[in-house]
Image (cartoon, grey):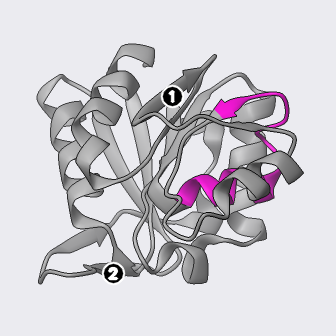
Amino acid sequence: MKKALLVISSKDFQPIEYGMTKRILEENGTLVYTASDKVGIAKAAYTNDKAEVDILLEDARAADYDGVFFIGGPGAMDCLDNEKSYKILREASSSGKAFGAICISTRILANAGVLKNKKAAGWNGDNELDKILYAAGAEYIREPVVKDGKIITADGPKSAEAWGKEILKIL
């Protein structure tokens, strides 16, 4: 059975991106684990949705999963743009695991240095993503979902279903 790790911020994660992706994976036989920067219950942005955290991000190892995927939301950059996230992303990249991000979390992949010579999508509401990806050696593709090798990125909640289906395919 395949195992996927979804990484969410402990506060203000994007509920559609998380919920839709988790549902698609689980309905198709993938075991889904949720990691975050804090244990306990993570709180979604915009809604009263909550998610139970299975593992502290700093304790997660890419080797234990078939793929590692970062969920966006307003809390992502505050809670997840750090060395703990970079470590698991670098582990996934160097071991040939599938990984990715949706929405603003694509910036975390860029900051981790795992997008060099890759194409990626992501949230660009501030018109900065092209510069961020260029600085990371990546190319910004203005598409809802972009797959480059084993990396899958998407632009936001409206693409969560398509992103989840692409993750399912690659796993």
In the rendered image, residue 169, in percent from the top left (x then y), is placed at 36, 15
In the rendered image, residue 138, in percent from the top left (x then y), is placed at 78, 38
- The residue positioned 39% from the left and 27% from the top of the image is 167
Secondary structure, mark 1, is: strand
The magenta segment is 105-119
Which residue is tagged 1? Answer: 146
The relative height of residue 53 versus residue 1 in the rendered view (above or below) is below
Q: Quadrant of the C terminus?
A: top left
Secondary structure, mark 2, is: strand
- The residue positioned 74% from the left and 28% from the top of the image is 118
Q: Quadrant of the N terminus?
A: top left
In the rendered image, residue 17, in percent from the top left (x then y), is placed at 29, 54
Instruction: Report which quarter residue 160 is drawn in.
Output: top left
Residue 26 falls left or right of residue 147: left
The residue nearer to you, when weighing 147 against 30, is 147
- The residue positioned 53% from the left and 59% from the top of the image is 124
Q: Can residue 2 be seen in this view?
A: no
Residue 108 colored in magenta in the image: yes
Instruction: Indicate which label's residue lies in the foreground, 2 or 1.
Output: 1
- The residue positioned 71% from the left and 22% from the top of the image is 96
- For residue 127, which numbered disc appears in the image? none
Q: How crowded is mark 2: few (under 14 residues within 10 Å), some or many (20 or more)?
A: some
Q: Distance between the residues labelled 2 and 1?
A: 32 Å
Residue 70 falls left or right of residue 138: left
Residue 24 colored in magenta in the image: no
- For residue 40, which numbered disc appears in the image? 2
**Which amino acid type is marked by label 2?**
Gly
Residue 27 falls left or right of residue 163: left
Instruction: Report which quarter residue 141 is drawn in.
Output: top right
In the rendered image, residue 114, in percent from the top left (x then y), is placed at 78, 41
